[in-house]
């Protein structure tokens, strides 16, 4: 937005103006017509072609150095089978490949060639590119095919006739030992005759070679041999007899035919042959000094054989061999999907995405002819190693995605063998990572791309080189672009750097694209100033971690969707597995990079405004199979692109005003399952998570949260204490940790109107489960306002049937301060059957009158009001301390872990009844400390004492009182000294203290005066009562005053059992809860809901304009949120942001 008197930034959905087939234009000149060229010569091999007129290409041209389309030029590619190989295509005029109403028929393959630095570089576009420059138009419209769909039934994995497995009888092949493995298959019995390891190192070499020779001699006619190198064999003269035997079996004689004679140490090699049939012989040798794999697949006699040798020279124990025999008939099967897929044709390649914890279980299949298939079926040929789940379970849609790879237009980088040294990163990569890239810059004229496969694109060698990259294009939804640009229905496959980057660009539509297998982040908003971009129904996965020589630091923990600005729209997208996060939403304080220093006084985002802006739209999205979190809302981007530890997201009604009323970000109808760490992780906020579905927030409502369901995944072998345990279902890497439905963290968290099921402890593996729980390894205090209300459970409470609550502890190192004082408020008793009860950790300190314990929860239930006592030390002080219940000196709050600086210790305190608490120190009494009371409502009170030593000189300062007369004043001016503890306990004003000089303890009664309004989740209704204690002069060396105190009496309660039967509270899922079906845009879609505009916010303050002393600007916003568009409904027509001039001062 360029500043002026008034600028309206539109969010209008425009219908594309239809056009005819571009290749039918009679004025076009043929590429192969000499008269079309200034020198009357058709471009030849190696030429740099410059196009200044209208040209049509209908056949494959010679291999070229470059193609430049000048502003007066146009290149149209006609339908056909055409291959174009060139170093780059620079578009200043037009490149047309089909149109929206005349989709490209045929097979177009554009290949971008060149080693890094070996081709001429362009300052803006670099090397190996398609560049859309100022004034340029790019129209690519591949054949109209469905981009992706979901299974409607599960697809079972192939049951093999034989599957090699280390250490299994009767073969017992060892791991971690170099040599060869040979398996012999009998095609008549369809069984393995033998499978044996031969060590070819040291003294065993001679004996092993003789045994191998004997094995070759023993083969019967028709026997099939599978041979693979395990780790390595030494290439030396002693191996010549082995080479001879391989050639005689595979080629009938020994004459140097086999590649194995060229083997070097740590080269993977595989071989397959049948005795008496040399036509079946196959072998593969891969020469590399980094991790590589050799695989061959052979089909014969009704069986398909797969032989693999994988060698990792850096971590040799990661090397392995594999042999698999599957019935060929079982490799062809019909799969059922939820959308019509008649556009998918024989020979097309598709992906069946993982539905398990491991995203690498995604498999490739080829479509076969299927005249008997319905429009919702397709036949595939594939030896599937994994089951792909295709069911919905209680409103959680776990139906696996199926995505199309093959397109009629393919843009691909030509990759070199191995890693060229020119790349400068061969110490990290064993392959070429310098692919092609497509870049669009400011003031392009037009761009629409659909139906295109981008393969081997992106450059890990250079920043800013991505498969599709909009670079500093500013507002592409403004008047400069009446025919709004979009990227629709494409596949980005095997990328070396990201999939699609939106950089300094606002208002781009990105719809129905597939992004699979990329280094670093997938869909990427670069600088944090990008706004009004619409990402709809995209499918991303396979984002690989980059550990060294990263483009940016966060590529070490990649996200399928890296979203750095809240003023964007995400609807119906799927994050189907990455090395870290599915969706990662985080912001910089102000835009970084080029967006932080834009041209012409353009303002992408005022400082800190992103922190205070609710996310525009996050609806109907899905995350599964991610190695960390499905949705991660945490951390802040620093100017150097490293990340801070904490989120700064605090949404306001007016984002331009820090003290504006709080707002919230809504996560609506989000589905998450099979993510290894967290389904959703939120920090900052508030966040409202509504009608979402999880397997294994701040406010969570109408959600469905499930533990371990019938989506079993793959059986897993687990190692513990040197022993192997077998699990009938898949397990995440941290499998010993509890399965937690909602793990409360700092909060406040409100869980209401939500359904839980499948949270039973695992008896065989020993891990625990709980529907409602607390974050593990938590050092921070939890909010005393964490609340549960109107929840239902689909199971009977008990260890073997399911646990409504579990405290989350698995080992002592997880038992940190935050865990020790975790609790929540059961507002309506839907968890415990006791209204207004509190659930907290099991322990004598917490056990007061009326409380009872429940063993399978490892927790107690108390029917009385509880809050938190929080203690802060002056920054940098190292003093440990503890809180004691005054009725029993032996009952100490077990918060013994030393914490420093701004991280306070927090203790649970009962705010009803005759209970009081005293603070003691281990060592010297500190000179200054703060005591806060949190979670109290009007009328709640508690007496707190603090050991400050006998005859101490001290000052007390209390804040948070309703009485301003003495608030924030010192002891001498405002306090009244009570005559004794009884006098203090009778105080109703809150301005008394009692100092017992004989014990060295000073006591204060904390009283909450503010009335809490309904729905107020803050720790205190007003300012939390806070006492600052300053100890002057010489301080006591011993801060433990218990020896001098007189205890009122031992009121420690025995531990009664909370034995009430807690039956299932719902036999079926409440209607309308959970996200439900997540692919809702096909033939059977739910009714579309059009978006509606919210009310305008108030205007911001008047902001300065650089180099203008008098005139500034102010803004106001509204969103497409009343309601948000659903089920493919229309986006709002109107303006989202208004900018007007104002006078400074």
Image (tube, rainbow, N blue to C red):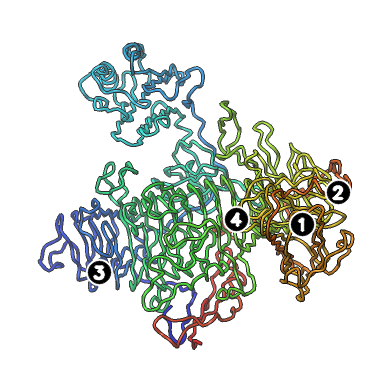
Gap in Å between the C-alphas at discs 1 and 4? Answer: 28 Å
For label 2, the SS is loop
From the viewer's perspective, tell me whether residue 614 is left or right of residue 807.
left
Q: Is residue 392 positioned above or below 324 on the image?
A: below
Residue 394 visible in the current orientation: no
Q: Nearer the viewer, mark 2 or mark 3?
A: 2
The residue that disc 1 covers is 951
The residue lying toward the viewer, choosing from 888 and 192, is 888
Q: Does the CB distance between marks 1 and 3 fall below 8 Å?
A: no
Q: If you read the primary sequence from the N terminus, does the residue marked by circle 1 or circle 4 appear first?
A: 4
Gap in Å between the C-alphas at discs 2 and 4? Answer: 33 Å
Q: Which mark is residue 321?
A: none
The residue that disc 4 covers is 901
Q: Residues within 10 Å of mark 2 (few under 14, many from 20)?
A: few
Q: Residues within 10 Å of mark 1 (few under 14, many from 20)?
A: some
From the viewer's perspective, tell me whether residue 287 is left or right of residue 336.
left
The residue that disc 2 covers is 1046
Q: Nearer the viewer, mark 1 or mark 3?
A: 1
The residue lying toward the viewer, choosing from 83 and 878, is 878
Q: Position of residue 669 (x, y in %)?
A: 62, 59
Placement of the N terminus among the 4 image quadrants: bottom left
Q: Residues within 10 Å of mark 3 (few under 14, many from 20)?
A: many
């Amino acid at each position: 937005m360029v500043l002026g008197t008034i600028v309206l930034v539109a969010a209008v959905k425009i219908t594309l103006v239809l056009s005819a087939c571009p290749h039918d234009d009679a004025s076009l000149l043929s590429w192969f017509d000499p008269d079309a060229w200034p020198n009357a010569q058709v471009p030849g091999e190696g030429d740099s072609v410059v196009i200044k007129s209208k040209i049509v290409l209908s056949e494959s041209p010679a291999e070229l150095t470059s193609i430049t389309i000048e502003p007066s030029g146009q290149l149209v590619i006609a339908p056909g089978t055409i291959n174009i190989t060139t170093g780059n295509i620079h578009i200043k005029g037009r490149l047309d490949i089909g149109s929206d109403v005349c989709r490209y028929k045929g097979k177009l393959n554009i290949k971008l060639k060149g080693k890094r630095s070996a081709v001429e570089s362009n300052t803006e576009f670099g090397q190996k590119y398609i560049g859309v420059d100022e004034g340029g138009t790019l129209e690519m419209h591949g054949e109209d095919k469905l981009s992706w769909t979901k299974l409607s039934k599960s697809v079972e994995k192939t049951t093999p006739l034989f599957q090699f497995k280390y250490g299994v009888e009767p073969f017992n092949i060892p791991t971690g030992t170099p040599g060869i493995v040979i398996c012999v298959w009998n095609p008549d019995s369809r069984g393995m005759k033998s499978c044996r390891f031969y060590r070819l190192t040291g003294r065993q070499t001679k004996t092993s070679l003789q045994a191998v020779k004997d094995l070759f001699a023993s083969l019967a006619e028709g026997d099939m041999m599978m041979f693979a190198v395990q780790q390595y064999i030494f290439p030396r003269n002693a191996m010549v007899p082995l080479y001879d035997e391989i050639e005689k079996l595979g080629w009938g004689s020994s004459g140097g035919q086999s590649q194995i004679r060229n083997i070097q140490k740590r080269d993977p090699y595989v071989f397959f042959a049948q005795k008496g049939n040399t036509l079946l012989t196959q072998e593969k040798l891969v020469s590399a000094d980094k991790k590589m794999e050799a695989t061959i697949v052979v089909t014969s006699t009704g069986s398909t054989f797969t032989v693999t040798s994988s060698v990792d020279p850096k971590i040799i124990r990661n090397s392995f061999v594999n042999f698999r025999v599957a019935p060929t008939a079982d490799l062809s099967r019909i799969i059922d999907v939820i959308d019509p897929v008649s556009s998918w044709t024989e020979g097309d390649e598709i992906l069946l995405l993982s539905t398990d914890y491991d995203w690498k279980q995604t498999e490739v299949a080829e479509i076969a002819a299927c005249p008997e298939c319905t429009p919702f079926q397709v036949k595939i040929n594939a030896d599937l190693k994994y089951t792909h789940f295709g069911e919905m379970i209680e409103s959680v849609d776990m139906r696996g995605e199926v995505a199309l790879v093959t397109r009629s237009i393919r843009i691909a980088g030509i990759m070199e063998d191995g890693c060229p040294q020119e790349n400068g990163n061969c110490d990290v990569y064993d392959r070429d990572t310098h692919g092609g890239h497509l870049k669009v810059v400011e003031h392009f004229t037009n761009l629409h791309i659909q139906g295109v496969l981008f393969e081997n694109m992106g450059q890990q060698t250079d920043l800013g080189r991505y498969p599709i990259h909009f670079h500093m294009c500013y507002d592409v939804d403004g008047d400069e672009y009446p025919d709004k640009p979009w990227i629709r229905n494409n596949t980005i496959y095997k990328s070396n750097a990201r999939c699609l980057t939106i950089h300094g660009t606002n208002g781009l539509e990105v719809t129905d694209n597939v992004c699979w297998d990329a280094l670093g982040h997938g869909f990427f908003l670069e600088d944090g100033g990008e706004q009004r971009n619409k990402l709809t129904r995209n499918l991303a996965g396979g984002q690989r971690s980059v550990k060294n020589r990263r483009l940016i630091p966060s590529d070490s923990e990649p996200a399928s969707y890296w979203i750095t600005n809240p003023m964007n729209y995400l609807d119906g997208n799927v994050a189907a597995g990455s090395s870290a996060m599915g969706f990662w939403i985080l912001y910089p304080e102000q835009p970084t990079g080029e967006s932080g220093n834009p041209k012409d006084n353009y303002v992408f985002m005022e400082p800190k405004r992103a922190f205070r802006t609710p996310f525009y739209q996050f609806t109907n999205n899905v995350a599964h199979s991610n190695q960390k979190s499905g949705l991660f809302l945490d951390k802040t981007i620093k100017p150097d692109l490293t990340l801070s530890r904490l989120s700064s997201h605090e949404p306001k009604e007016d984002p331009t005003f820090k003290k504006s009323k709080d707002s919230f970000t809504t996560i609506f109808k989000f589905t998450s399952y099979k993510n290894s760490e967290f389904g959703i992780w939120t920090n900052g906020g508030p966040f409202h998570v509504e009608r979402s579905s999880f397997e294994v927030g701040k406010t969570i409502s109408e959600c469905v949260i499930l533990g371990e369901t019938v989506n079993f995944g793959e059986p897993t072998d687990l190692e513990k204490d040197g022993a192997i345990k077998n699990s009938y279902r898949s397990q995440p890497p941290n499998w010993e940790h509890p399965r937690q439905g909602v793990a409360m963290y700092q909060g406040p968290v409100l869980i209401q109107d939500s359904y839980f099921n499948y949270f039973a402890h695992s008896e065989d593996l020993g891990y625990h489960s709980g529907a409602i729980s607390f974050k593990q390894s938590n050092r921070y205090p939890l909010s005393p306002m964490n609340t549960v209300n109107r929840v239902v459970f689909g199971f009977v409470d008990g260890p073997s049937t399911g646990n409504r609550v579990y405290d989350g502890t698995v080992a002592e190192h997880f038992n940190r301060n935050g865990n020790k004082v975790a609790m929540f408020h059961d507002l309506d008793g839907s968890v415990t059957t006791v209204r207004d009860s509190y659930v907290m950790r099991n322990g004598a300190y917490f056990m007061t009158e009326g409380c009872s314990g429940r063993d399978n929860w490892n927790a107690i239930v108390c029917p009385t009001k509880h809050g938190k006592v929080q203690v802060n030390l002056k920054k940098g002080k190292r003093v440990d301390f503890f809180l004691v219940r005054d009725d029993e000196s032996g009952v100490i709050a077990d918060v013994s872990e030393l914490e420093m600086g701004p991280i306070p210790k927090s203790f649970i305190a009962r705010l009803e009844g005759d209970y009081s608490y005293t603070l003691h120190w281990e060592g010297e009494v500190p000179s200054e400390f703060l005591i806060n009371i949190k979670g109290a409502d009007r009328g709640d009170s508690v007496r707190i004492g603090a050991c400050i030593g006998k005859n101490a000189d001290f000052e007390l300062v209390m804040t948070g009182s309703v009485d301003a007369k003495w608030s924030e004043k010192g002891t001498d001016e405002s306090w009244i000294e009570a005559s004794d503890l009884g006098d203090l306990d009778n105080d109703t004003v809150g301005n008394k203290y009692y100092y017992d000089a004989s014990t060295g303890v000073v006591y204060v009664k904390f009283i909450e005066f503010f009335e809490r309004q309904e729905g107020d989740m803050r720790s205190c209704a007003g300012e939390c009562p806070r006492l600052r204690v300053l100890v002057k002069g010489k301080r006591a060396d011993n801060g433990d005053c218990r020896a001098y105190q007189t205890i009122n009496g031992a009121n420690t309660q025995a531990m009664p059992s909370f034995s009430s039967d807690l039956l299932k509270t719902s036999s079926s899922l409440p209607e309308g809860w959970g996200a439900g079906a997540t692919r809702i845009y096909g033939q059977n879609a739910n009714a579309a809901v059009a978006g509606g505009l919210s009310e305008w916010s108030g205007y911001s303050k008047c902001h300065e304009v650089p180099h203008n002393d008098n005139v500034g600007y102010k803004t106001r916003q509204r969103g497409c949120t009343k309601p948000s568009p659903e089920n493919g409904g229309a986006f709002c027509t109107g303006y989202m942001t208004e900018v007007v001039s104002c006078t400074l001062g």
